[in-house]
Image (cartoon, helix red, strand yellow):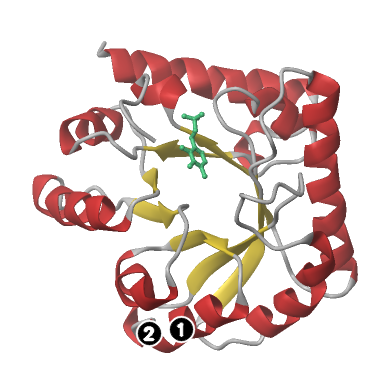
Amino acid sequence: MSPIAKNLQHVRSQIVVSAERAHRAPSSIQLLAVSKTFGTDAVMEAVRAGQQAFGENYLQEALEKIAAMKSLAPAAQLQWHFIGPIQSNKTRPIAESFDWVHSVDREKVARRLSEQRPPELGALNICLQVNISGEQSKSGLAPEELPAVAAQVAALPNLALRGLMAIPEPSDDVARQRAAFAAVRGLYESLRADGLPLDTLSMGMSADLEVAVAEGATIVRIGSAIFGARNYM
Ligand SMILES: *Cc1c(COP(=O)(O)O)cnc(C)c1O
């Protein structure tokens, strides 16, 4: 078995164990393999091990990889998720090439994605990114901005608002990790209570997968635990 196949198997079993501890169905958690900085050979190994959903942060790198994978594995039915910062003048290729965008943090970006989404591709799945730890440098909506922006985005025709994404401040303290994920979940539940039909909580990375699953993550975004250490961020 290739190292990537072995790592995938390990991460999948971590998801099962974490779900069972949280009394959740393992199938309610989707594994997104974050392949940023890794080439098509690594992605191909993951595909051979049964992985179909991939997350990318850097647009140019992602577009090249998506095109290359189309010719390397035309039958693979891969799903591409954009999870990186978005410049509002670069929305068109995102709208044209991705199935999901997790990192929408302003109405303008959502509006452009909706306008530029080719209708034949169906609705583009959207998560709003929330800045849960209040870090100045981090992107994401402040919790108090969320209800108004969520209502605006939900009304856009070519998008499907699915839920929230967050990257809490890294911490070795499990209680702090847990509190941050619980806060995201609270925001998600209150939007649902307002009537938005959300079904997705995108949270949890290699270091905090289990805690995120305990607090309700439905997509975990896992990079280094699958592909190994990155050379650059
Ligand atoms: C890089 C990245 C990940 C994956 O992080 P790992 O710690 O390597 O699992 C997840 N989400 C986002 C937004 C990222 O940029």
- Residue drawn 71% across and 27% down? 19
Residue neighbourhood size for the residue with mark 2, other residues' Cα within 10 Å, grouped as few (<14), some (14–19), many (≥20): some
Q: Is residue 23 visible?
A: no
The kind of residue tagged 2 is Gln
Give the x, y percent position of residue 67: 16, 57
Give the x, y percent position of residue 59: 31, 57
Q: Is residue 222 left or right of residue 59?
A: right
Q: Are marks 1 and 2 in contact (CB under 8 Å)?
A: yes
Nearer to us in this view, 87 or 98: 87
Regarding mark 1 in the picture, which secondary structure is present there? helix
Q: Which residue is mark 1?
A: 112
- Image quadrant holding the N terminus, namely top left
- Residue drawn 36% across and 36% down? 51
Q: CA distance from mark 1 to mark 2?
A: 6 Å
- Image quadrant holding the C terminus, namely top left
The quarter of the picture where residue 151 lies is bottom right
> Mark 1 vs ligand 1: CB under 8 Å?
no
Q: Is residue 192 above or below residue 57?
A: below
Q: Which residue is mark 2?
A: 116
The kind of residue tagged 1 is Arg
Q: Is residue 35 above or below residue 206?
A: below
Q: Looking at this view, name the residue that lies furthest to the left.
A: 71
- Residue drawn 79% across and 20% down? 174
Depth-wise, is mark 1 or mark 2 nearer the camera? 1
Regarding mark 2 in the picture, which secondary structure is present there? helix
> Mark 2 vs ligand 1: CB under 8 Å?
no
